[in-house]
Image (tube, rainbow, N blue to C red):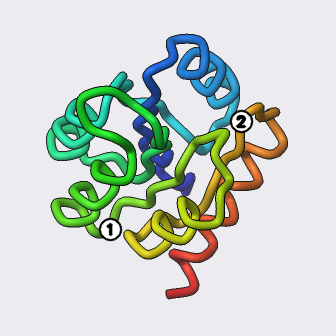
Amino acid sequence: MTQARKRMLIVDDNDLTRALLRGLLRNEEEYEVVGEASNGEMAVELTQRLKPDIVCLDVDMPKMGGLEALARIREISPQTVVLMVTAHTERETVQTAIAHGAAGYIVKPFNAGRVLSAIEAAMAKVVQK
């Protein structure tokens, strides 16, 4: 029996970044992109409606930033795995994200190997819990 595909939500205010992530994941049998959002408010709304297994969430976005969206997503959907997608690797930002429940980081600029490795590592953490 085949394992169900992991449902993913991609959240980034940059259209190109969303397109790149979508393109990287399109050929991966274990993942299905079920939605996209361009700000934190939409991320929270779509998480509640679509119930994704994984959210790739940008840190800097309009309307509601990624760290605030992360906290809200963890409240409404604690089982959802959230990976932060960012060019910001400042210690404080990373620590805040981890403290709010982020399972990992995808650092921009990224490539397919790093994205898939980060997703797999985050999913492995969840399986171990």
Q: Residue at x 47, y 43 (%)?
A: 59
Quadrant where the image shows the N terminus: bottom right
Instruction: Give the image quarter of residue 87.
Output: top right
Q: Position of residue 37 (x, y in %)?
A: 34, 25
Place of residue 109 in the rendered image (x, y in percent of width and height, measured from the top left): 77, 31
Side of 97 relative to 111 (left or right): left
Say if 39 sits above or below 49 in the image: above
On the rendered structure, is 13 left or right of 21? left
Q: Is residue 117 above or below residue 65?
A: below
Q: Is residue 70 left or right of residue 123?
A: left
The residue drawn where x is 57% and y is 85% is 128
Q: Nearer the viewer, mark 1 or mark 2?
A: 2
Label 1, residues with CA under 10 Å away: few <14, some 14-19, many ≥20:
some
Q: Amino acid at mark 1?
A: Gln
Sequence-wise, which precedes: disc 1 or disc 2?
Answer: 1
Q: Secondary structure at mark 2?
A: loop
Q: Secondary structure at mark 1?
A: loop
- Name the kind of residue labelled 2 in the image: Lys
- Name the mark on residue 79: 1
Give the residue displayed 71% in from the left and 36% down from the top: 108
Is 117 displayed left or right of 11 in the figure?
right
Q: Residues within 10 Å of mark 2 (few under 14, many from 20)?
A: some
Q: Which residue is mark 2?
A: 108
